[in-house]
Image: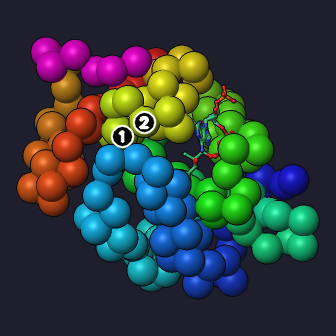
Amino acid sequence: MIVRLATEADLPRLPEIELSAVDAFLTTSIPPGPLSTVTPAEGWRDALEHGTLWVIDGQQGTPVGFLGAHRDRGELHILEFDVEVGHQGKGLGRLLLNHVIAWARAEGLSEVTLTTFRSIAWNGPFYGKMGFVEIPDADMPRHLADTLKAERARNLEERCAMWLIL
Ligand SMILES: CC(C)(COP(=O)(O)OP(=O)(O)OC[C@H]1O[C@@H](n2cnc3c(N)ncnc32)[C@H](O)[C@@H]1OP(=O)(O)O)[C@@H](O)C(=O)NCCC(=O)NCCS
């Protein structure tokens, strides 16, 4: 399995992967509705051009997972992180996230941030195992508070913001 920077040719695959990944939530109490609105391929162009969009190839060299992020000063904020449903739970997500964390460290960034479901196994607890911690309210950056507010407005509950201090 290869983790690599995305190319232009990968863009059309990304909404398909994101939509497929939502199936992970079918076994949970999270309503799939708000999660089914996916970012269109063009929505990833900025990350592509800034070198903050990675994919993981499946056996045929077609991406089966991706991670798109936004870099701002010392922070890398993960916007989206998905593995196609049939490939989940096999270690690909951990491989991809470890790659991106190592990249962020090598770039001299100070933190990796994200918002996620607090108690879904492959969200908050997984990030916790990777060294992320929930951001205390007193330290919450404005843009993450705004993201959580916007997520609540989309009926996404049980969300939290986490960071990994590098
Ligand atoms: C989150 C996601 C990208 C992780 O990718 P993945 O390839 O499934 O992850 P891995 O196989 O490396 O597993 C990572 C951890 O998640 C847990 N996990 C993954 N799938 C799971 C499942 N179906 N049930 C329970 N735990 C699961 C694993 O237990 C693992 O931890 P462990 O190996 O220490 O036990 C993927 O599960 C996914 O796309 N989920 C749906 C979308 C999503 O939640 N994205 C993240 C938004 S913040």
Q: Residue 120, image x and y in percent?
A: 42, 36
Amino acid type, mark 1: Thr
Residue 23 in the image, given as x and y percentages of width and height: 50, 62
Mark pair 2, 1: CA separation = 9 Å
Image vertical order of residue 11 relative to residue 131, above or below: below
Q: Going 63% across and 61% down the picture, which residue do you hit?
A: 85
Where residue 53 sits, quadrant-wise, is bottom right
Q: Position of residue 89 (x, y in %)?
A: 69, 44
Q: Residue at x 29, y 58 (%)?
A: 31
Q: Nearer the viewer, residue 10 or 123?
A: 123
Identify the image quadrant of residue 11: bottom right
Is 75 contained in the magenta span?
no
Query: What residue is pinned by disc 2?
Result: 120
Q: Nearer the viewer, residue 74 or 63?
A: 63
| Between 5 and 29, the one nearer to me in the picture | 29
Q: Secondary structure at mark 1?
A: strand
Q: Is residue 103 visible?
A: no
Determine crowd level at label 1: few under 14, some 14-19, many 20+ residues with C-alpha closer than 10 A. Answer: many
Closer mark to the observer between disc 2 and disc 1: 2
Question: Residue 153 bears which disc, if any?
Answer: none
Note whether ligand 1 is within 8 Å of mark 2.
yes
Query: What type is the residue that disc 2 sits on?
Result: Ile
Q: Is residue 136 magenta?
A: yes
- Ligand 1 image-quadrant field: top right
Determine whether the residue tagged by mark 2 lies in a helix, strand or loop.
Answer: loop
Residue labelled with disc 1:
116
Classed neighbour count for the residue bearing mark 2: other residues with Cα under 10 Å, few (<14), some (14–19), many (≥20): some
The verdict on label 1 being within 8 Å of ligand 1 is yes
Tell me which residue sits at (28%, 21%) in the image: 135
Q: Are marks 2 and 1 in contact (CB under 8 Å)?
A: yes
Q: Which residues are magenta?
A: 133-138
